[in-house]
Image (spheres, coloured by chain):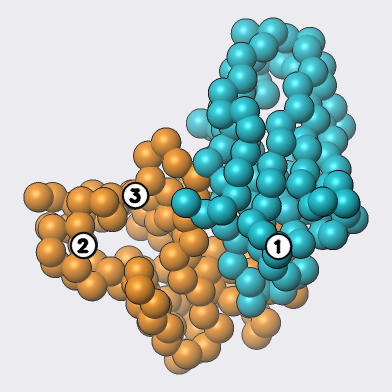
Amino acid sequence: DAKTTQPNSMESNEEEPVHLPCNHSTISGTDYIHWYRQLPSQGPEYVIHGLTSNVNNRMASLAIAEDRKSSTLILHRATLRDAAVYYCTLRGETSGSRLTFGEGTQLTVNP
Amino acid sequence: DSGVTQTPKHLITATGQRVTLRCSPRSGDLSVYWYQQSLDQGLQFLIHYYNGEERAKGNILERFSAQQFPDLHSELNLSSLELGDSALYFCASSVGLAGGAYEQYFGPGTRLTVT
């Protein structure tokens, strides 16, 4: 499976934007970039995914580098509820149906 | 609420026993996935079923088995339980078969404690 690299932890203040980076230098042409988050004591929650173009939804935005070797999840205004572990993962023909989770980024949001 | 339900929420059992975890996918989703989350291994993919057929296996022990029924709900059977099987077990569902275009929706999990 193609590997992703994320910082172990990041910190933000409430109401400020947060940019969570992910490197995936071995991404293949058919791999989609998926982001999930896991709040304490809950199951992972789908956030957003994309292939080549930037994507927006009600939760976040996904900015994908032109060479697709990195991406950034953008939370436009962090809230305390956004404190979670954020996982960046790749899904495509090579990875098949599974999601492969690394360590993720623990996001702390300060009031 | 993701629309994926799992029962039971908590399960405490003894070593050597057998348990069954149940998952109901979101309405309309044909794919069901099982994941295990433990403190030392993180979130690991176990197995994937699509419309009743096994499609992919991950790090699933031979003591574990799963099936998906005609009504699309799925069961994960864990037998000859060991202390190391204590973990959170998550079920996820998705509308599609494979490839990256489809997101997965996770249930709240079953916390299994083996004593």
Identify which residue is drawn at 77% across, 68% down: B97
Between A76 and A3, the one nearer to me in the picture: A76
Q: In which quarter of the image is residue B67?
A: top right
> What label sits on residue B89 in the rendered view?
none
The secondary structure type at the circle numbered 1 is loop
Please determine whether, in this image, residue A31 is positioned above or below residue B14.
below
Q: Are marks 2 and 3 in contact (CB under 8 Å)?
A: no
Q: Do labels 2 and 3 share a chain?
A: yes
- Tag 2: residue type? Ala
Task: From the top left corner, tell me how far across and down residue B18 is, in percent.
Answer: 79, 18
Looking at the image, is mark 1 or mark 3 nearer the viewer? 1
Q: Quadrant of residue B64?
A: top right
Can residue A99 be seen here? The reply is no
Which chain does the cyan colour mark?
B
Identify which residue is drawn at 78% across, 12% down: B17
Q: Spatial distance from mark 2 to mark 3, Cα to Cα?
A: 11 Å
Between B25 and B36, the one nearer to me in the picture: B25
Please determine whether, in this image, residue A19 is positioned above or below residue B31.
below
Horizontal arrangement in the rendering, residue A87 relative to residue B83 (left or right): left
Q: Name the residue under label 3.
A: A84
Q: Mark 1 points at which residue?
A: B29
Which chain does the orange colour mark?
A
Q: Which chain carries label 1?
A: B
Q: Which of marks 2 and 3 is nearer the N terminus?
A: 2
Q: Which chain carries label 2?
A: A
Can residue B68 be seen here? The reply is yes
For label 2, count other residues whose C-alpha is less than 10 Å away and answer few (under 14), some (14-19) or many (20+): many
Please determine whether, in this image, residue B45 is positioned above or below residue B13.
below
> What label sits on residue A78 in the rendered view?
2
For label 3, count other residues whose C-alpha is less than 10 Å away and answer few (under 14), some (14-19) or many (20+): many
